Image (cartoon, helix red, strand yellow):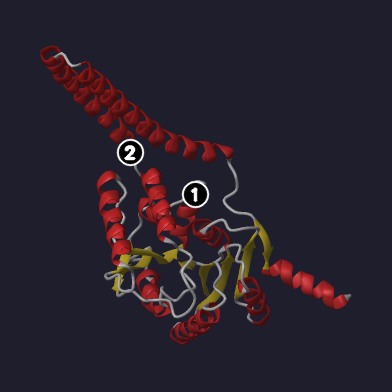
Amino acid sequence: MKLISIVVPCYNEEEVLPLFYTEICKVMEQMRSEHADLAFELLFIDDGSRDRTLELLRDMSLKDARVRYVSFSRNFGKEAGMYAGLERSRGDYVVVMDADLQHPPAFLPQMYNYVKDGEYDCATTRRVSRQGESKLRSFFARAFYKLMNKISQTEIVDGAQDFRFMSRQMVDAILEMQEYNRFSKGIFSWVGFRTRYIEYENVERPAGTSSWSFWGLFRYSLEGIYAFSTAPLSLAALLGVLICVIAVLLLIVFAVKAIVVDDADLRFLAALCIITLLSGLQLFCTGILGQYLSKTYLESKHRPIYLSREDETMYRERMKDGNKS
């Protein structure tokens, strides 16, 4: 038997979780009918949800032996959720997908066909449209991918999703990258392996609301830049040289004018402009250095990527003890 682990990070997904479970069960039964040697496990990662997500996962794990779950002690973020799922997965193949059905389960049979023969190590989806998103959000998303591919040696395909069907070899390679500040889109590309992209139109959530705000996505994009590019450090050095040249030229111009015109106010304004310009440049460059230093500082602490509070085994044992008493 070949086991497929389906890793599903969840955060406040009580509205859409029953819909997802129904759809994924249909796809698993379809794949079992076509490939009798397949077995499945559903590994849900509850990322500190504040709604009834954990209660639903508990019920599902009692009714369906294929369902496993891990509940975090607090919200650690989707990156930690994906890492925890990969770490605890037991399958020969591992799928990472969201619970909001924007990653259509119907693609799983096609993904499996690409990976099973060893021609590809990974099959993933790529959105060719951003229908349903705001124009502003779509603009910044495309701009991020263009910028990232120019300043980083790691290529990140525009529209590529976290929805991936991977071989165990690729999963093990990803787990070797145990950095605390994670950017999975970059990690998936950095480890390499042969990847097949499946293009599809954007799918909107059937229920619930996304936990990703514009500001959250912006911060996440900055994480990607800091994690896979040192270009901002080079930019700081380049700006330093450029502004120094401009400052010297301005100083010469203002000095000549001050001598010719002999205006004390002009000399004062010239000095004020140069001081302000250089101070702003110093703060900007210090801020860039501070960001990289903060990432290094967090990595040096060797904090765990996540902390679990409960899983399906602990819950079942607790239920048994409760029934005995």
Q: Could you say which quadrant of the image residue 89 lies in?
A: bottom right
Which residue is at 39% across, 56% downward?
A: 185
Check the image and report above or below for 12 versus 260.
Answer: below
278 or 259: nearer the viewer: 259
Q: Is residue 83 visible?
A: yes
**Between 105 and 225, which is closer to the camera in this rendering?**
225
Residue 157 visible at all: no
Instruction: Name the element at disc 2.
Output: helix
Give coordinates of residue 129: x percent, y percent: 27, 71
Q: Which mark is residue 141?
A: none
Residue type highlighted by circle 2: Pro
Around disc 2, counting alpha carbons within 10 Å, would you say few (fewer than 14), some (14 to 19), or many (20 or more)? some
Q: Which residue is mark 1?
A: 176
Q: Amino acid at mark 1?
A: Glu
Left of 254 or right of it: where is 280?
right
Horizontal side of residue 310 vs 320, given as left or right: left
Question: Decide: marks 2, 1 in contact (CB < 8 A)?
Answer: no
| Residue occupying image coordinates x 36% and y 67% | 124
**Between disc 2 and disc 1, whose residue precedes?**
1
Which disc, if any, is residue 232? Answer: 2
Q: Residue at x 31, y 39 (%)?
A: 231
Which quadrant would the C terminus be assigned to in this image? bottom right
Where 234 sits versus 274, above or below?
Answer: below
Circle 1 packing at 10 Å, graded few (<14), some (14-19), many (20+), is few
